[in-house]
Image (cartoon, rainbow, N blue to C red):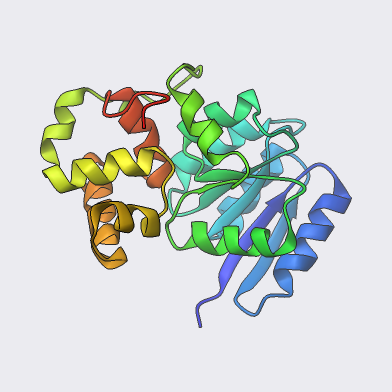
Amino acid sequence: MAVIRVVVADDQELVRAGFGMILDAQPDIEVVAEASDGEQAVAAVGEHRPDVLLLDVRMPVMDGLEAARQVCERYPDCKVIMLTTFDIDDYVYDALYAGASGFLLKDVRRDDLVHGVRMVASGEALLAPSVTRRLISEFAARKPSGASATLRAPSRLLEQLTIREQETLRLLARGMSNAEIAAELVVSEHTVKTHVSNVLSKLGLRDRVHAVVFAYEAGAVVAGEG
């Protein structure tokens, strides 16, 4: 069984310790390091090369956004989950553009935390269930500072996708799970996974959440549509 290596970065010791205890109790997860600021988080990822970094949005010395950007640029194999105390935090939008694979609220339930780490480690994107659709619906109206040029997508790139892949992208961008997309398209979940994989590969996107950003930037979907 492959073990998921995790670094937990938060300036609150109790948060770090609590998340660390929950994750270390899982047979397939190991917390390899902790960090109390953004600079330490980047250094810990460089030293331990974890699969997942749990990173607080608001950090001293170097904030979580800059730490996420540096980790995603230097260590692309490490998936970043941002931690926030707010349902919708301005920094979250920038963090997703910086390369983070999603975010969780700090009051996340134990099971959801564990599931989230496993999901992101497997290559999925993660948005807290309580805010997923609200977050997605507001993407189009916001232009985060420092947004990556690779995600400012010309609509012509959509032409690389088959009709079925374009349909999958539009449904994915509305916050649908693989099961929901499969039901909508009347295909198997395995087929949906193949479509999603093809979309990410053809468009050069990191994961599902960046496919959502791409879809709005390219005009494949419009906020509030559907």
At 62% from the left and 23% from the top, the residue drawn is 90
Of 168 and 99, the residue lying toward us = 168
The location of residue 41, given as percent across then percent down, is: 66, 45
The location of residue 26, given as percent across then percent down, is: 68, 75
At 82% from the left and 59% from the top, the residue drawn is 18
The location of residue 86, given as percent across then percent down, is: 72, 33
Q: Please say whether residue 130 is visible from this viewpoint.
A: yes
Q: How many marks?
A: 0
Taking the view exactly as shown, the residue that stands out farthest to the right is 14
Q: Is residue 74 above or below residue 110?
A: above
At 27% from the left and 58% from the top, the residue drawn is 192
Q: Is residue 194 above or below residue 90?
A: below
Give the left or right position of residue 195, taking residue 110 as reference.
left
Of 170 and 209, the residue lying toward us = 170
The location of residue 101, given as percent across then percent down, is: 49, 45
Of 176 and 92, the residue lying toward us = 176
Give the left or right position of residue 163, taking residue 56 as reference.
left
Q: Is residue 155 above or below residue 182?
A: above
Name the image quarter holding residue 212.
Answer: top left
Give the left or right position of residue 59, taking residue 128 as reference.
right
Of 51 and 158, the residue lying toward us = 158
Give the left or right position of residue 52, taking residue 163 as reference.
right
Q: Please say whether residue 205 is visible from this viewpoint.
A: no
At 63% from the left and 47% from the top, the residue drawn is 43
Question: Quadrant of the image for the C terminus?
Answer: top left
